[in-house]
Amino acid sequence: MSTSFTKLKLSIDGAVARIWLDQPEARNAFDDIVIAELTQAFTEAGAAPQVRAIVLGANGPAFCAGANLNWMRRMADYTRDENIADAGKLAEMLRTIADCPKPTIARVQGDVYAGGMGLVAACDIAVSVDSAWYCLSEVKIGLVPATISPYVLRAMGTRAAQRWFLTAERFAAAEAHRIGLVHEVVAADALDAKVAELVKALTGASPAAVRACKTLIADVAGREIDDALIAKTVEGIADIRASDEGREGVQSFLQKRKPSWLNP
């Protein structure tokens, strides 16, 4: 890729893009630079025609410890307008991940705190090592997990949030799995194999259908099942059936051959 990053790495190998948080000495805590670079990396990977899946990982013992201390020191003197602009960049980054046209996997190899929870929740799929700890620690320092809340609430649900947002207790990977924040919990030596298994599933599916599924979930989740929603779902299946990949997928299934998107 043409873009050079200072605090993360982006590599594209065939159909898979990998974005690595790369500040192990700072526990991959983020600041305004990391936020801008993550926004750019997901935008580039999402736009790359050959990419069919994006994996977000981190180097070092922690996945992401939330906000960088030096950034927090700067924020302490911000005016309200400066805080709004600053938080707006974080919100834009999270939305870029959540709305990425390509499916995304969070590869969680270590602890996840505060804003890092937003990164995990904004990805479509999350796989965690069994030794990782999770914490929405904001209330301990007089803050709230406001910007990340749409994604974390969507992932863990309101009832779980009523405990973990309010108490700022740490919870284990097994609890993160139980409440739905992460989809799989594995031993550390099985993490890459599980991610590879998911990547294989994602890259074996129709790229257009996967993209349409992401839109479908966003459009349908939380909506009242009324005539307008039913009409939207009817249009959705009619449109995809008539699409090139929709026709090719059905024909390949009926003809017992591989669809074109799997051919070299």
Image (cartoon, helix red, strand yellow):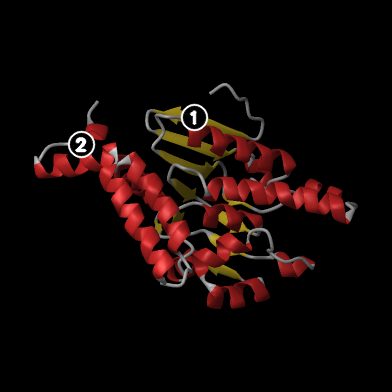
259 horizontally vs 83: left or right: left
Residue 237 coordinates in the image, percent (x, y): 30, 53
On screen, residue 43 above or below 140: above
Kind of residue at badge 2: Pro
Please tell me in which quadrant of the rendered image residue 192 appears: top left
Residue 105 coordinates in the image, percent (x, y): 45, 48
Tell me which label, 2 or 1, sits earlier in the chain: 1
Direction left: furthest residue:
255
In this view of the protein, can residue 13 be seen by the observer?
yes
211 horizontally vs 263: left or right: right
Q: Which mark is residue 204?
A: none
Badge 2 vs badge 1, beta-carbon distance below 8 Å? no
Q: Quadrant of the C terminus?
A: top left
Q: Secondary structure at mark 2?
A: loop
Residue labelled with disc 1: 11
Per the model, the C-alpha gap separating discs 2 and 1 is 27 Å
Direction top: furthest residue:
2
In this view of the protein, can residue 129 be seen by the observer?
no
Q: Secondary structure at mark 1?
A: strand
Residue labelled with disc 2: 259
Please tell me in which quadrant of the rendered image residue 114 appears: bottom right
Residue 153 coordinates in the image, percent (x, y): 56, 67
